[in-house]
Structures are given as structure tokens and as C-alpha cells.
Image: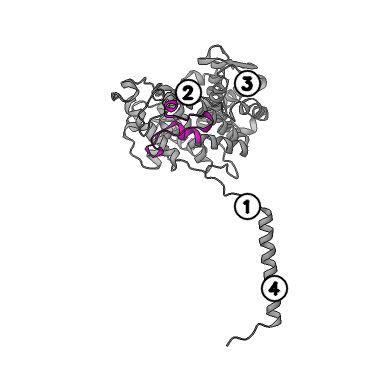
Amino acid sequence: MSSAPTRRHRRSRAALLTTLTAALVGALLAGPGPAAPRADAAPAAFTHPGVTVSQGQLDFVRAKVAAGAQPWKGAFDQMTASRYADPNRTPKPRAVVECGSYSNPNHGCTDEREDAIAAYTNALAWYLTRDERYARKSIELMDAWSAVLRDHTNSNAPLQTGWAGSSWAKAAEIIKYTYGGNWANSGRFATMLRDVYLPEIINGSNSNGNWELTMTEAAVGISVFLENRDSYDRAMARFRTRTAAYVYLESDGALPKTVPSQHLDTRDEIVRYWQGQSTFVTGLTQETCRDLTHTGYGIASISHVAETSRIQGQDLYGTDVGERLRHALGFQAKYEQGAAAPDWLCGGELDLGLGPVTEVGYNAMHNRLGFAMTNTQALTERTRPSGTNNLFVAWETLTHGDNPA
């Protein structure tokens, strides 16, 4: 038989009960604890350089170029022979960039986009050659714009800000974190990104799919450079919603996903938004029946954000983001390669011109994750080395072509 508890044991039990009760009451008063971090939340510490291209990727490319290996050497030669690497390039900044629909009017729009691409081009050339003249040219371009730019205006302002902001962030990451001690005005450039660019793009514009994805790409890249965890999280949340609403998967159901704020409440409204396309198949995008050029813009930004997120420690390629990217690439590549469009697809007519947008997604989904991607592979290899679309995509055979880093 068990003996009765002693007075000391009874006191110990009472003390334990009091402690547990106090803890429970405290927990109830405190409310629910912090939610577990999302898979795409900002990292505790950002990785630099870490916008679309990492230092490991750059080191891989540098070794390949030095060895004369292809396709990297050919891609490097293409880049350094371009007008974006011209040592005599003179920046053309202005205080207000005014861009109307299709850049009409064009008051500084082309100048800003191309100076941003040139800054990125020279930053890449600096890292791959260690020739300081390239670094100084990149800095000259960034300093010129950060000294005077104050605003973007007219109807294309959000998109223009996204296009230029995407390239500025990539250039700034490489220069600051590989040549940084020699960039005296990096703080002023950061202020420009924070005060002129980020407010224009962080809340979106409720516009067409490629607009929102490009703006989100710029917001993510700028947030990494600024180490702004709040804006990074906001941009990534918008990215997940927008990607799901841009590329259709059969698992979405009878109709594509939509963005709640757009109030596409009926099938007819969704069909109109999808350029009149009423048959939905995996890999179709919201702009496929507009043209493959604008579709390429959306695909490029999806791949750029996914790549930046991977570098920052949250790999989205294994999620529905990667699935949508893989199928979007494959679907568009099939027709870009010359397959005839069936009658149910855009009335049997497609406006081609996907652009140099396949390398990043193909490298991630095929080389890293092992998906076959036959159509995308054929298109990617046929169009190497990929150059630039003169808006925000540049030199991705060089930076991401068969890059295991």
C-alpha cells in the first residue's frame, strides 16, 4: 500500500499548482504568442550581394570567363561590347522623370532605364574583371541620379519606377558589398531608393499583371539593399498573390485565381481580364493572349524575385511559385519555338517575342531541381547568349546560365 503524502510533499504540490496556475493566467492575459514566420518572410540577416545574383554565382562566372569557357565567355564579350559598358557613357539624370503610356511623353524614361542597366552592367564587369574603371563608371551613374532625382510622374510612373528600380538595386548591391569602401555617396543613393522609388511601388497600382510583378521585383530588391524587413515582407506577400493570379494551374479550379482588390467577380470579367481567353490550361498566363513580350516581363520578374528570395534563404522554387514559373516557361517556349497555336488559344494567333527571360527560371527548375523542361531548354540554348530587353532584364546567360551556385 502506498503511504499518505507527507506535509512537505503536500506543500510542494501546492507550490507547483500555484506556479502552473500563474503561468496559465499569464499566458491567457498575454494573448496568443507570435505567429511562426512565413516561409517567404524577411531573413534575420540579409545576404549581400543578394538581389537576383549572389557572390557565389558571380565567383562561378568569374572563373568560367577567365577560363574562356562557353557560354559565359561569349556572354561576357557581348555585355562588354554593348553600349551599356561604353566607358564614355555620360549619365542623363533629371529631377522629374515623366512617362506616359508606352513612354509617351518620354521625358527621361529611356535615359533613366538605360543608365540603370548601364550601372548594373558596369558593376558586373567590375566584379568579373576587377578593373576599377568599371566600378567607377557604375558609381558615376548612380551618383548622378541620386544627386537630382525627386519624382516620377504621369501614367506610367509606377511601371517606370519598377523597371529602373530593379536595375539600380542589382547594381548597388554589387558595388556596395564588393567595392563599397570606395563609394562615398552610397548613403545618398540609399536615400533616393527609400524616398523616391519605394513609396511609388510598395503599395502596388492595381494594374495589369506584369506591372505589379515588375514593381514587386523592384520593391524586393530595394528592400534587400536597404535591409528593410517590413517592406520586404509586404512586397513578398504581394508577390505570392500576384504570381498566383498571373499563371494558371489546373489545380486552381475552373477559373484562374484573382486579386481581391480587383473585384473580378464573374467568369465574364475574368475572361475579359485574361485578354478574352476562355479556355484555361496549365502554364497559360494572364497576358499570353495580349502578346508574349509582355508575358515575358511578368515571367522575368517572377524568376527574379524567386531567385532573390532563394539567396536570402527562403527558396520558393519548391513551392507553387516554382510550379507556376516552370509551366509558364514551358507553355510560352513551345509557341515561341514555332508550334502552331490551336484555335482555342487566343483565336489561333499568338504575338511572339518572349524576350531574354528564360535563363534564371530554367537554371533553377531544370539544373537545380531536375525538371526536364524540354521546350524551355531548346529555346534557352537556341537564343544564347541572351542580352537585354533594354528595360530591366540584362545578361542572364552570363549570370545564371547553367550556374550551380
| Mark 3 to mark 4 CA distance (whole Å) | 71 Å
- Residue kind at label 1, given as amino acid type: Gly
| Mark 4 to mark 2 CA distance (whole Å) | 78 Å
303 relative to 107, above or below: below
Measured from the top left, where is residue 146 in percent x and y? Answer: 65, 23
Measured from the top left, where is residue 39 in percent x and y? Answer: 52, 45
Span highlighted in magenta in the image: 241-270
- Residue kind at label 3, given as amino acid type: Trp
Measured from the top left, where is residue 238 in percent x and y? Answer: 54, 34
Of badges 1 and 4, nearer the viewer stands 4
| Mark 3 to mark 2 CA distance (whole Å) | 22 Å
Q: Earlier in the sequence, mark 3 or mark 1?
A: 1
| Mark 2 to mark 1 CA distance (whole Å) | 53 Å
Q: How many marks?
A: 4
Mark 3 near mark 1, Cβ–Cβ under 8 Å? no
Q: Earlier in the sequence, mark 2 or mark 1?
A: 1
Measured from the top left, where is residue 357 in percent x and y? Answer: 42, 28
Front-most of residues 74 and 201: 201
Mark drawn on residue 33: 1
Q: Residue at x 39, y 36 (%)?
A: 249
Q: Is residue 93 magenta?
A: no
Of badges 3 and 4, nearer the viewer stands 4
Front-most of residues 122 and 262: 262
Q: Quadrant of residue 220?
A: top right
For residue 182, side relative to residue 105 (left or right): right
Q: Which residue is mark 2?
A: 80
Front-most of residues 387 and 96: 96
Mark 1 near mark 4, Cβ–Cβ under 8 Å? no
Element carrying mark 1: loop
